[in-house]
Amino acid sequence: MLPMFARIDHVGIACHDLEERVGFYESTFGLTVAHTEVNETQGVREAMLDVGGSYIQLLQPTRDDSPVARFLARHGEGVHHIGYGVDNVSDAITELIGRGLQLVDEQPRHGSMGAAIAFVHPKSVGGVLTELVQAAGRHRGSLADVDLVADQDPDAERHQHAKSPADDIAHDGPAHMRAADPRADGPGNGERHEYGNESDRDPR
């Protein structure tokens, strides 16, 4: 069986103060910010710090009722999820469902930096919230060929279910500010990672 994961795309870390955490990683580890986003719909700010073609994704809530804020209230600062790069997120979803895993997203949706993403329920991955990431421009199945769905508001789903796995997810969305994407030149990638049209990208 061929490996499904091509790389560790990013590690998502929830924090209370984005600027403070960015400053810590810059001054302590010499990392640089490759990309930032703000999404008011889901109440989150993020910064992606490049680590040799992978990322540390720092996540700060912008309001108290956001998914990341609830995560912080329950668990405090720390690792929120791990994102793995896949060649084709639709194929990965189909394969994992066939293996009996529970997915939060059974269809791909828009993610950070123009990616198509889906989350796997932590109950199926030993308690680890797991994100599948197909970066824009990957050689198999360009994002133009991926049937993306509009991102659902996790709060709306929470009202329908007593406990929704999406409550703990910081959904990725359109960029507030764009920077060069080291993913394009990172190990094993070899292709440009570009945004699609902002008009057809759904908010987180």
Image (spheres, grey):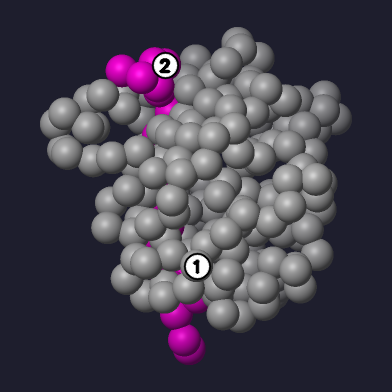
Residue 62 visible here: yes
Name which residue lies at 22% across and 25% down. Answer: 24
Residue 142 higher or lower than 26, as above or below: below
Left or right of 170 in this view: 151: right
Left or right of 114 in this view: 178: left
Q: Please state the horizontal and vertical placement of residue 113, each as a whole percent of the image.
A: 56, 50
Separation of marks 2 and 1 at Cα, in angstroms: 32 Å
The label number, if any, that marks residue 16 in the structure image:
2
Question: Disc 1 designates what residue?
Answer: 192
Q: Quadrant of residue 23?
A: top left
Q: Which residues are magenta?
A: 1-20
Name which residue lies at 58% across and 28% down. Answer: 38
Secondary structure under badge 2?
loop
Tell me, yes or no, whether the highlighted magenta stretch contains residue 26. Answer: no
Q: Please state the horizontal and vertical placement of residue 11, each as a whole percent of the image.
A: 39, 46
Q: Amino acid at mark 1?
A: Arg
Left or right of 136 in this view: 26: left
